[in-house]
Image (tube, rainbow, N blue to C red):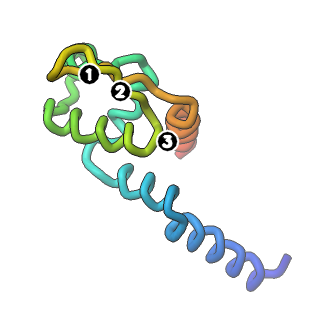
Amino acid sequence: MGEKEKEKQLEEQITKVLTTSETAEIKRMLEKDHAVDCLFLLALDKGKWKKAKTYMNKHKLTLSDGTYRARMIEITQLGLSKATPIDPLKKQYTITKKGEKLATALLKLLQNI
């Protein structure tokens, strides 16, 4: 495959990711503050605010409850997690297979940089 063909193939792949509804929405979510943190928290079964806060504090990382809730809502809307009501104000979030796939891919990507 020539250089021009490789460039064209790369452009087509990037354009598809940027313009396909599902991948574009996931990309936009990942660009937001603490989105990757929240996805990793779900992978660690820290889908309740108290567990997430304890984990983040233990590792001297910051995450506000408002940011956590906003990202979890978005992650759930994208089908990457499932929300189960605990009471009228609290929810338990659990990662879906699709969310696990994304979290694993992100972890591998970040480890290989």
Badge 2: residue crowd in 10 Å (few <14, some 14–19, many ≥20): some
Q: Quadrant of residue 17?
A: bottom right
Residue furthest bottom as drawn: 4
Q: Amino acid at mark 1?
A: Lys
* In this view, 77 is above or below 56: below
Determine the CA span between mark 3 and mark 1: 29 Å
Residue 65 is left or right of residue 47, and the answer is: left
Residue marked by disc 2:
83
| Residue 24 percent coordinates (x, y) | 46, 61
Instruction: Look at 18% across and 31% down and name the residue there.
Output: 62
Q: Which mark is residue 110?
A: 3
Secondary structure beneath dot 3 equals helix
Image coordinates of residue 13 in percent, x first then y, are 64, 68
Helix, strand or loop for disc 2: strand
Q: Which amino acid is tagged 3?
A: Leu
- Residue 1's spot in the image, x, y percent? 85, 76
Residue 2 pos. (x, y %): 82, 81
Q: CA distance from mark 2 to mark 3?
A: 27 Å
Q: Residues within 10 Å of mark 3 (few under 14, many from 20)?
A: few
C-beta proximity under 8 Å, tags 3 and 1: no
